């Protein structure tokens, strides 16, 4: 329920203020260019921290008949208001070293003038300023609620900057960009609120009042360059100087510095009054700089990017909301809940889980079954139900997703009239410590409730995996003697973007039906071991991905042939010199680390492929230990030459093998990990990296073992090291 409050608050605030935020963001992006364009003008003179006020005054007195004011703006441009030798009154930028004119005062461009007025007050004067102040505060609240949602999603502060699972473009970049623009946006909003309060005199007065002393007669008037006060003030510390209006001793120099204001006697140069700048004035000055970017190109660029980010958040946020509503509303039931034998309930956060549920729903309908589908929040009595199938995703730290927030309460209060068989499919990501936690909780609820019998054990799907979902469908078909056909939507692939790869070598399948394929791109491509080769077979154009091992400039794939496997049979039928059309996708989170002392690689079966490339490209000869599980000695033969080469190059430190079929007692890769607890503990303790590649079943067992090792040996759960980025996984 808590997460719903934060989410709805975030959405409502965004909807209420969307028009004003849109205007403020667009005009803010435009105005970010103004300080950039000003800074590109060549009026700044280097070395103002070395030039004294006395030196500048001396050259100005010689260059002009009279000087009224001197100003140093936020761009470090020095301007003076003077009467020239020709008797003209002018204001322009000067060189403080020579006194010569550099150029006329920059006039505000019409586009910036228009954008400024719209940004400040919407052309509504006082009413507009009030609205903009309120909108700035609302945007601040939106930022805070957004951060809270990210924390919930990622699993707390420690995982705030950890890997984000990419479900779709809008969701992924909404989180990624949000994390990196949070601070600039908070600064923009708070300074905007502060500047609005300043305009309405809500804040304490920033004006400085001087106590004018009784004038003391001075016999001789010193030259300005002899004023000790001006000799000690550097031009870089000056904001402005007002010269005395007359030669009367009661008229003083008014020198405004960054932190104080001085009254200086025009005859002796003595300071007659010194007042520190108020804290409200300092805050106002910094608020103006931070809100507008005046005087700095770098911060102006940051403000520009932050303004563009806000526009993207508006688009992606509303797009996700509409998509979520669309996914949950477009499913139409042909049967009502009282007549359906199959009840499908869905707990989804982004709408992705509804896609899988819908495919299963349509397959059951196609097989002639009566089916009803709804959100978990609509749980009720089902008079004719024989099967209850729950598709449940997990949000953040194991919380219920948005469409299941009330399920637990409903489940406790609603009693079914007959025994129902249930199956739970959990959707989540192994990148998060609470993988499929909510699905586990739902499964536990059903186990403990009278009137429910498990039809299939809890099944977990990592990152909406298409292949893993097909595995569950096969389990369902076997357990029910059905042959459900899932209609997967064919993606639109731009065939022109696919690259050509030439087959250089291919081994014959071994006793495990595993084989190696060596591919060479026909054009120059950038890729590394751990990246993914995406293939789109003509049968369905559904993407299949294979982890890449890069040796020299060739791609090494390790593939297991399946009897009805579309891609595995395609690769197995390839001949040398055949052409494969595919594309390489970067997988930067699974590249070999080069800034650590130790790396442990854990794989089973064909998951060894990316590690084959990594151990042969370990140029820094980092201590690398490979753990691998296969069926028999014959399973290893196709990899043996590559591993021996790595040992000869000193790029592999140790190799540990587990054979599951060579002896009476089966040994798996997680078993040999237990035999090397000290090695694994030391690697993690010394900030080393553990990499895991292979089947999800293997990964789950390995993670359990690793968690036991870290808990017992290091007194820390494995999630601590996952949060530190010390566990890298690419499993399927």
Image: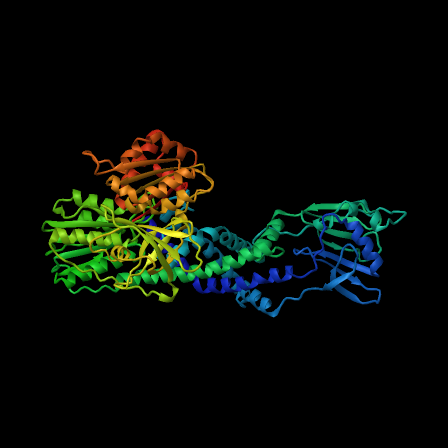
Res 715 quadrant in image: top left
Q: Position of residue 41 (x, y in %)?
A: 67, 61
Q: Nearer the viewer, residue 138 or 208?
A: 138
Figure colour scheme: rainbow
State the count of labels.
0
Position of residue 510 in the picture relative to residue 100 (left or right) = left
Taking 212 as reference, is 356 above or below it? Answer: below
Q: Residue furthest right?
A: 219
Rendering coords of residue 473 (x, y %): 19, 54
Displayed quadrant of residue 370? bottom left
Residue nearest the observer in this picture, 649 or 164: 649
Q: Looking at the image, which residue is at 46% across and 42% down?
A: 619
**Image spot of residue 267 (x, y percent):** 84, 49
As rendered, which of 353 and 481 lies closer to the eye?
A: 481
Name which residue lies at 22% across and 45% down: 511
- Residue 627 spot, x, y in % from top left: 33, 38
Whether residue 156 is visible: yes
| Residue placed most toward the observer, 282 or 508 | 508
Q: Residue furthest front?
A: 576
Q: Quadrant of residue 533?
A: bottom left
Residue positioned 44% across, 38% down in the render: 622
Left or right of 577: which side holds 387?
A: left
Question: In this rendering, does residue 559 appear at all?
Answer: no
Seen in the image, is 194 located left or right of residue 718? right
């Amino acid at each position: 329920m808590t997460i719903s409050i934060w989410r709805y608050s975030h959405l409502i605030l965004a909807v209420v203020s969307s028009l004003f935020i849109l205007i403020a963001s667009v005009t803010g992006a435009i105005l970010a260019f103004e300080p950039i364009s000003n800074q590109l003008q060549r009026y700044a003179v280097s070395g103002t921290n070395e030039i004294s006020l006395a030196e500048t005054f001396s050259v100005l007195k010689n260059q002009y008949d009279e000087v009224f004011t001197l100003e140093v703006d936020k761009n470090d441009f020095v301007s003076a208001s003077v009467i020239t030798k020709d008797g003209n009154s002018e204001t322009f930028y000067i060189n403080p070293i020579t006194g010569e004119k550099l150029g006329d005062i920059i006039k505000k461009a019409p586009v910036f003038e228009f954008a400024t007025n719209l940004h400040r007050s919407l052309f509504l004067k006082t009413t507009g300023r009030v609205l903009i102040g309120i909108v700035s505060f609302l945007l601040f609240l939106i930022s805070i609620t957004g951060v809270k949602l990210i924390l919930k999603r990622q699993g707390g502060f420690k995982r705030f900057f950890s890997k984000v699972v990419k479900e779709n473009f809008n969701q992924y970049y909404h989180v990624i960009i949000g994390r990196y623009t949070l601070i600039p946006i908070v600064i923009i909003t708070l300074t905007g609120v502060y500047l609005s309060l300043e305009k309405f005199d809500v804040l304490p007065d920033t004006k400085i009042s001087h106590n004018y002393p009784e004038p003391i007669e001075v016999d001789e008037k010193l030259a300005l360059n002899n004023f000790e006060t001006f000799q000690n003030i550097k031009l870089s510390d000056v904001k402005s100087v007002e010269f005395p209006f007359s030669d009367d001793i009661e008229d003083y120099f008014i020198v405004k510095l960054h932190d104080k204001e001085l009254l200086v006697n025009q005859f002796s140069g003595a300071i007659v009054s010194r007042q520190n700048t108020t804290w409200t004035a300092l805050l106002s000055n910094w608020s103006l700089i931070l809100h507008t970017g005046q005087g700095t190109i770098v911060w102006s660029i940051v403000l520009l990017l932050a303004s563009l980010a806000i526009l993207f958040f508006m688009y992606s946020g509303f797009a996700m909301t509409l998509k979520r509503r669309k996914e949950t509303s477009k499913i139409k039931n042909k049967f009502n809940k009282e007549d359906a034998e199959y009840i499908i309930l869905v707990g989804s956060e982004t709408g992705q889980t509804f896609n899988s549920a819908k495919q299963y729903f349509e397959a059951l309908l196609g097989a002639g079954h009566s089916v009803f589908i709804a959100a978990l929040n609509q749980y009720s009595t089902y008079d004719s139900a024989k099967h209850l199938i729950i598709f449940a995703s997990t949000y953040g730290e194991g919380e219920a997703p948005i469409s299941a927030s009330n399920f637990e309460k409903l489940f406790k209060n609603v009693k079914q009239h007959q025994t129902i068989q249930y199956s739970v499919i959990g959707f989540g990501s192994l990148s998060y410590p609470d993988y499929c936690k909510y699905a586990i909780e739902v499964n536990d609820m059903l186990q403990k409730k009278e009137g429910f019998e498990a039809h299939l054990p809890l099944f977990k799907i990592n990152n909406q995996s298409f292949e893993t979902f097909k595995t569950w469908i096969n389990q369902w078909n076997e357990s029910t003697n059905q042959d459900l056909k899932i209609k997967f939507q064919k993606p639109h692939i731009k065939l022109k973007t696919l690259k050509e790869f030439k087959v250089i070598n291919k081994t014959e399948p071994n006793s495990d039906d595993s084989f190696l394929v060596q591919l060479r791109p026909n054009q120059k491509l950038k890729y590394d071991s751990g990246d993914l080769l995406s293939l789109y077979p003509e049968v369905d154009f559904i993407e299949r991905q294979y982890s890449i091992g890069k040796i020299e400039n060739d791609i090494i794939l390790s593939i297991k042939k399946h009897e009805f496997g579309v891609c595995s049979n395609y690769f197995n039928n390839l001949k040398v010199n055949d052409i494969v059309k595919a594309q390489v996708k970067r997988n930067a989170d699974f590249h070999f680390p080069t800034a650590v002392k130790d790396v442990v690689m854990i794989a089973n079966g064909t998951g060894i492929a990316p590690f084959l490339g990594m151990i042969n490209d370990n140029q820094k000869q980092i201590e690398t230990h490979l753990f691998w599980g296969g069926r028999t000695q014959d399973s290893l033969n196709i990899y043996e030459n590559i591993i021996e080469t790595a040992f000869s190059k000193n790029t592999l430190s140790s190799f540990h093998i587990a054979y599951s079929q060579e002896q009476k007692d089966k040994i798996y890769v997680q078993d040999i990990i237990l035999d090397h607890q000290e090695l694994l503990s030391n690697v993690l303790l010394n900030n080393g990296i553990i990499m895991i590649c292979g089947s999800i079943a293997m990964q789950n067992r390995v993670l359990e073992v690793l968690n036991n090792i870290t808990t017992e040996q290091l007194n820390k759960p494995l999630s601590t090291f996952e949060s530190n980025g010390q566990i890298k996984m690419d499993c399927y």
